[in-house]
Amino acid sequence: MVEKKEKVDSKKQNTGGSEFQITVFTNRIKNLTEHLKSNKKDHNTRRGLMRLVGKRKKLLSYVKDKSNERYESVIKSLGLRR
């Protein structure tokens, strides 16, 4: 019986995982926030920022519904919800 190599590799490069996506969205949100501090009239970027915040919020609620421990670890590692 041959084991699927995909299972082993997916653990190392799980870019589709909720925690990874939340981390990416958080980094993008921080970068856009800094951009908007110096470009106050950039409304298109502000709209994109609001969409990212909404996506991250949905993913956080999904992770919280699945596992409260994973949710707490993501919140703690990213420094959200002070």
Image: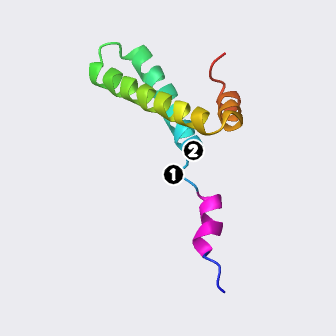
Does the magenta segment cover residue 43?
Answer: no
> Visible in this render: residue 22?
yes
Establish if 59 lies above or below 4.
Answer: above
Left or right of 1 in this view: 59: left
Residue position marked by numbered label 1 in the rendering: 16
Which numbered marker is on residue 69?
A: none
Which residue appears at 46% of the width and 21% of the height? 33
- Give coordinates of residue 80: x percent, y percent: 62, 23
- Residue type for callout 2: Phe
Dot 2 falls on a residue whose secondary structure is helix
Q: Quadrant of the N terminus?
A: bottom right
The image quarter containing residue 55 is top left
Q: Residue at x 55, y 43 (%)?
A: 18
- Badge 1 vs badge 2, beta-carbon distance below 8 Å: yes
Helix or strand or loop: what does disc 1 sit on?
loop
- Image check: 57 left or right of 67? left
What amino acid is found at the position of numbered circle 1 in the picture? Answer: Gly
- Distance, label 1 to label 2, CA atoms, is 7 Å
Residue at screen point 69% across, 32% down:
77
Badge 2 is on which residue?
20
Answer left or right for 34 relative to 6.
left
- The rendered magenta stretch, by its main secondary structure, is classed as helix
Quarter holding residue 81: top right
* Residue 60 percent location from the top left of the image: 55, 32
Q: Residue at x 68, y 38 (%)?
A: 70
Could you tell me residue 44's position as x and y percent?
28, 24
* Residues packed near mark 2 inside 10 Å, few (<14), some (14 to 19) or many (20 plus): some
The magenta segment is 5-13
